[in-house]
Image: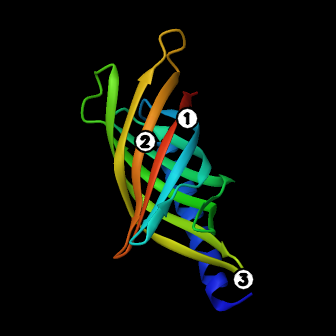
Amino acid sequence: MNKYMLVNLRLRQLLLRVGLMSLMVFMSLPVHARTYIAVAPAQLKIKTDSGSTKPKVMDYRLGYDMGVHKLELAYMKSQSDDNLNELVTDIPSVTSLFYRYDPDPGSGIKMEFILGYSQVEIESTYINVPTFTETFSGLSYGIGIEEALQSLPQMKFKIDFIRMYKGDTLKLDLLSVGFRYEF
C-alpha cells in the first residue's frame, strides 16, 4: 500500500469516527430528537473545462433530527459509470458529514441549508491506459427540500442539491432524490 492510499484510508476512517462520535453525543442529549435513515438514488455531475459526466450512486444516510438542526453521516456507493469521449468515470465511494439547518420548522414543505465535509473518490479509465483513482475532499454546501407523506408522517420525500467539491477546474455536484424515515 503506497503512502497516498494509506493517508486516504486514515482520512476516511477519521471522518467516519468523527461522524459516529458526533451522532452518539447528539443522541445522548436530553432533547426531543429523532434518529433517521435516508436512501436515495443520486447523480454526481463531474464538470471540468473539457466536459462533464454524470455517474450514478446510491446515497445512504444515518442522521439525527433535533428540530431545526440535523446532523447526518452519508455514504454513497457506485451504481453505474459514465463516459465522455471514451474516458470512463466512476465514483467508487463518497463519505460525507453534513449539518442541515431548517429556518422555518413549521412549514409543510421544508427547505434546509446544508453544510458539511465530503471526500469523493473518482476512478477514470481510458483506452490502453491503466485505471487512475483520485480523491477530492473539502467543504460541501447545498439546499435540501423535503415533505412528509400524508399517510405516513415518519416518511419524508426529499431532494438534495449539494456542491460536493469545487476546485479551480473541477466541480462535483450531487442531485439526490429519495426518502427519509424517522424512528
Q: Which residue is mark 3?
A: 130
Q: Going by the image, does 85 lie left or right of 143?
A: right
Q: Position of residue 31 (x, y in %)?
A: 41, 34
Tell me, yes or no, if residue 114 can be seen here. no
Nearer mark to the viewer, of 2 and 1: 2
Q: Residue at x 44, y 52 (%)?
A: 98
- Disc 1 to disc 3, C-alpha distance: 41 Å
Please give the count of numbered marks on the rendered protein: 3
Q: Which residue is mark 1?
A: 36
Query: Which amino acid type is shown beneath numbered disc 1?
Result: Tyr
Q: Which residue is mark 2?
A: 160
Q: Residue at x 41, y 29 (%)?
A: 146
Relative depth, front residue between 33 and 14: 14
Q: Residues within 10 Å of mark 3 (few under 14, many from 20)?
A: few
Tell me, yes or no, if residue 107 can be seen here. yes
Q: Residues within 10 Å of mark 2 (few under 14, many from 20)?
A: many
Query: Which amino acid type is shown beneath numbered disc 3?
Result: Pro
Q: Position of residue 71 (x, y in %)?
A: 45, 46
Q: Residue farthest to the top?
A: 151
Q: Quadrant of residue 69?
A: top left
Query: Which amino acid type is shown beneath numbered disc 2?
Result: Asp
- Disc 2 to disc 3, C-alpha distance: 34 Å
Q: Position of residue 75 (x, y in %)?
A: 60, 53
**The N terminus - image quarter:** bottom right
Secondary structure of residue under mark 1: strand
Q: Quadrant of residue 172?
A: bottom left
Q: Residue farthest to the left?
A: 103
Q: Residue at x 30, y 27 (%)?
A: 105
Secondary structure of residue under mark 3: strand
Sequence order check, earlier mark of 2 and 1: 1
- Disc 2 to disc 1, C-alpha distance: 16 Å
